[in-house]
Image: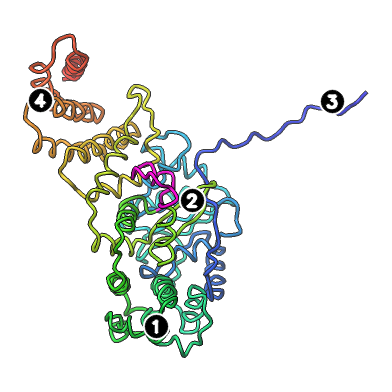
Amino acid sequence: MNIKKNITIIKKPKKKKLISEYKPESNPNFTQREQELKILQCSLEQNNKLLIYGIGGIGKTTIAKELVKNQSNVYFFDIEVGLKTALTPHLLEELKEEEILNKVGEYLNEESNYIILDNALTTDGKDIKSFISKLPNAKVIITSRDKNFNVNLNSEPIDRLSDDETYQMFIKYLEKNYSKEQLEPLLRFTANTPLVIEVLAKQSKKMLKRRELNEVIEYFKDSNLNLKSKIPLSRDDVNSKDITEIINTIFKSNQIERQEQKELLTALANLSPEGVSLDNLIKWLNIEDEDELIETLEELESLGWLSEREEENRAIYQIHRIIKEVIDKNIKQPKTIDLLINSLAKQLKLKNLNNNDLNGKKYLLDVKELIKNDLETEEFTILLNNLSLILKALGDLNEAKKHQLKATEIFEKVLEPSHPSLAILYNNMATLYYYMEDYREAKVWIDKAWNIIKEVFEKSHPYYQGTLETKQVIESKL
């Protein structure tokens, strides 16, 4: 008799996965920050909660990722768009807006978990404080340009690199073994800041294929890059605007000329800061030649304007927020923006309103960036409307109302007063106010919708019947 066959093994049930993990990768060009890493690691172990702060382009995100590169349970969120908005696309099941911080916090509160909240703003401090209070066991790393968070955590500044560190990082990107003395004129242009070092070194690397080093140095001198007098060596006298000014000067001195490059940079600057997959770029920009797209992406990466990483066997492309600011200032590609608006409006469309099919929530971060364009077109209004419907289904009624109101205001400008599409938006406004239990305001909007619908559609039409039914439900609450 095999006794093993008669033993019942009781296994601990697996925790249901609620939110997707992040696979940390080490930056191969990360250099000379070992001492800072030790300080940050010690600070994190003391309190489990750490704020890393410094100017834009200083390397806060990179060093946060280095801290967790050997860990398995890592969760990464770019929260400049707001904490709840940043969490939502990563949720593997549907949660209402008011449940997100509680349930995600409860799920992530394990000693083995590392959570990175990247690009935090003090305006989001209340949600951050509430979220962290639910994570007493997990290790939380916040990166921000601001150090003034009313949260119980250790705070550590990230300084600019020393001259030796700047040189080491520069030659890693340059992939040529020049001496520090030879590169000194170029190194002075970098403000000892990792983002500028990467961009300037990559630009120089390309130019050195057809020019001598002294010619490259003279080229950048002529480009008015010599900002040393404006950028003292002390940390407190340098701000993100200084770094943006240098990047902007480099960008303008090496003007992007190919249309394909302009279109791609425009797209990436108007989509999620967490990056966009190759598949989505192909789909959203109606790309016919994938090989040509990849070649253009590789060219832009070699110049330092974007970065690539692999995530779940997919290529993800993204740009730094400072580079985004520079692109927004220098490149205007309205056709690319229109393509993205049309594509994302389709992605956000609820396939089944009754069952609240929320597949579109994964594109919330892309749409949040895209709507910053603040256009007044019919296509942009459709995007806002579909965004509002997704947010309403997620229970974020106030945010849904904001976008629905904006969509309605645009349609009132661009459509005839009796247009059926305007009635649909009025109906959506009425529904929102109904769920917010503001029945008097809901009645105002449904009356506007009804005044159009009853004149445009036959009684047998679904819009006629649906609007009448909504009107009756709202009036029953008064």
- Which amino acid type corresponds to the residue marked 2 in the rendered image? Ala
458 w.r.t. 73: above or below: above
Give the CA distance from mark 1 to mark 4.
64 Å
Q: Nearer the viewer, residue 23 or 382?
A: 382
Q: Which residue is mark 4?
A: 448
Q: Is residue 46 left or right of residue 226?
A: right
Please, is residue 248 above or below residue 260 in the view? below
Distance between the alpha carbons at the discs numbered 4 and 2? 48 Å
The residue that label 3 is drawn on is 5
Q: Residues within 10 Å of mark 1 (few under 14, many from 20)?
A: many
Mark closest to the chain's N terminus, 1 or 4 = 1
Callout 3 amino acid: Lys
Q: Quadrant of residue 226?
A: bottom left
Residue 147 pos. (x, y %): 37, 66
Mark 2–mark 3 Cα distance, whole angstroms, equals: 47 Å
Q: Which residue is mark 1?
A: 186
Q: From the image, state whether disc 4 or disc 2 is nearer to you.
A: 2
Question: Which type of secondary structure does the marked residue at label 2 adopt?
Answer: strand
- What's the CA distance linking mark 3 and mark 4? 71 Å
Please name the residue that numbered disc 2 is placed on: 315
Q: Secondary structure at mark 3?
A: helix
Q: Secondary structure at mark 1?
A: helix
Compared across the picture, whether 196 is left or right of 8 comes to: left
Quote the CA–CA distance across marks 2 and 1.
Answer: 32 Å
Which numbered disc, 4 or 2, marks the residue that appears first in the sequence? 2
Q: Earlier in the sequence, mark 2 or mark 1?
A: 1
At label 4, counting other C-alpha atoms closer than 10 Å, the crowd grade (few under 14, some 14-19, many 20 or more) is: some
What x and y, as percent, mark residue 119?
A: 38, 59
Q: What SS does tag 4 mark? A: helix
Q: From the viewer's perspective, tell me whether residue 351 is left or right of residue 415.
A: right
State left or right for residue 229 relative to residue 15. Answer: left
